[in-house]
Image (cartoon, helix red, strand yellow):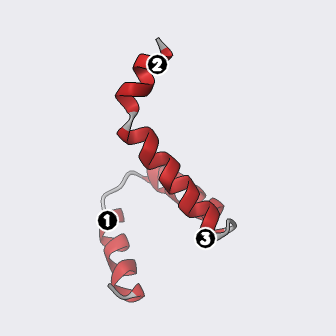
Amino acid sequence: MTTKEIKSEIEKALDGIPENVLQEILDYLKVIRSKSADKVKLTKNLRDILTEDKDLLERLAK
């Protein structure tokens, strides 16, 4: 996908999102804009791990 196509898809995805959620998304985008690409990738990878291993982490917490 080109950058233009990605931005268009993002705009479509944002249609119908409640205003308070849009503000959270904007705040998040501002945060990641100030981070390096490596840090953004690391954050995404960590989020993926936490999501995939949610059940395991909950069992370990008990």
Q: Residue at x 40, y 79 (%)?
A: 7
Quadrant of the image occupied by residue 4: bottom left
The residue singled out by tag 1 in the image is 13
Proximity of marks 3 and 1: CB atoms separated by less than 8 Å? no
* Lower sequence index among marks 3 and 1: 1
Depth check, front residue: 59 or 36: 59
Spatial CA distance of label 3 from label 1 is: 23 Å
> Is residue 14 left or right of 21 when viewed as pictured?
left
Graded by Cα atoms within 10 Å as few (under 14), some (14 to 19) or many (20 or more), the crowding at tag 1 reads: few
Spatial CA distance of label 1 from label 2 is: 36 Å
Instruction: Assign the N terminus to one quadrant of the image.
Output: bottom left
| 39 shown above or below 51 | below
Task: Say which amino acid is labelled 1.
Answer: Ala
Q: Residue at x 36, y 72 (%)?
A: 11
Q: Position of residue 19 (x, y in %)?
A: 44, 53
In terms of secondary structure, where does tag 3 sit?
Answer: helix
> Is residue 15 left or right of 3 when viewed as pictured?
left
The residue singled out by tag 2 in the image is 60
